[in-house]
Image (cartoon, rainbow, N blue to C red):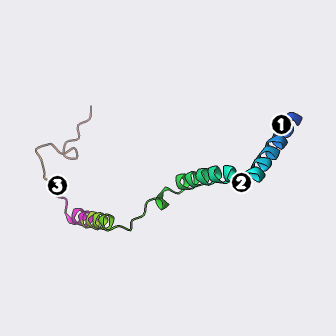
Amino acid sequence: MKRFSLLTWVILIFLGIGILVRFIDSPSSIIIPVAVFGTIFYFLKHPEKLRTRNNNRDRYYYANQRKNQKKETKRSFTVIKGNFRDDEEDKHYH
């Protein structure tokens, strides 16, 4: 664990005292920036909670997207034999 120097401790103590005095003098000058940065940090960590899917347009879009996915998966895949030689038939070695 890294130990801090005496100068670092003095700076941290003065910083704490300054924040405490500012909070006692006008609490809104501390609460509002903390709330704004806290909200930004929260939504950066959890972006899926920012976007809600409650409106009808999104429901319609996602419903159609699911239908399209089902249609694509039902199609069968057929291979058409071409004019190329089969590698298994002619194995020529030097």
Q: Position of residue 21 (x, y in %)?
A: 80, 48
Residue ID for mark 2: 27
**Residue farthest along the top direction in this orientation:** 94
Residue ID for mark 1: 8
| Point 23% across, 62% down: residue | 72
Q: Which of the two residues, 72 or 26, is positioned nearer the viewer here?
A: 26
Q: Nearer the viewer's eye, disc 3 or disc 2?
A: 2
Is residue 37 visible in the rendered image? The answer is yes
| Point 86% across, 35% down: residue | 5
Image quadrant where residue 60 sits: bottom left
Question: Crowding near pointer 1: few (<14 within 10 Å), some, many (20+)?
Answer: few
The quarter of the picture where the C terminus appears is top left
Q: Between marks 1 and 3, how big is the CA–CA gap?
A: 72 Å
Image quadrant where residue 62 sits: bottom left
Q: Position of residue 85 (x, y in %)?
A: 15, 43
Nearer the N terminus, badge 3 or badge 2?
2
| Point 83% across, 36% down: residue | 8
Nearer the N terminus, badge 1 or badge 2?
1
Q: Secondary structure at mark 3?
A: loop
Q: Which residues are magenta?
A: 68-79
**Residue farthest along the left direction in this orientation:** 83
Nearer the N terminus, badge 1 or badge 3?
1
In the rendered image, residue 78 lying in the magenta stretch gets the answer yes
Q: Position of residue 74 (x, y in %)?
A: 22, 66
84 horizontally vs 65: left or right: left
Dot 2 amino acid type = Pro
Q: Position of residue 10 (x, y in %)?
A: 86, 38
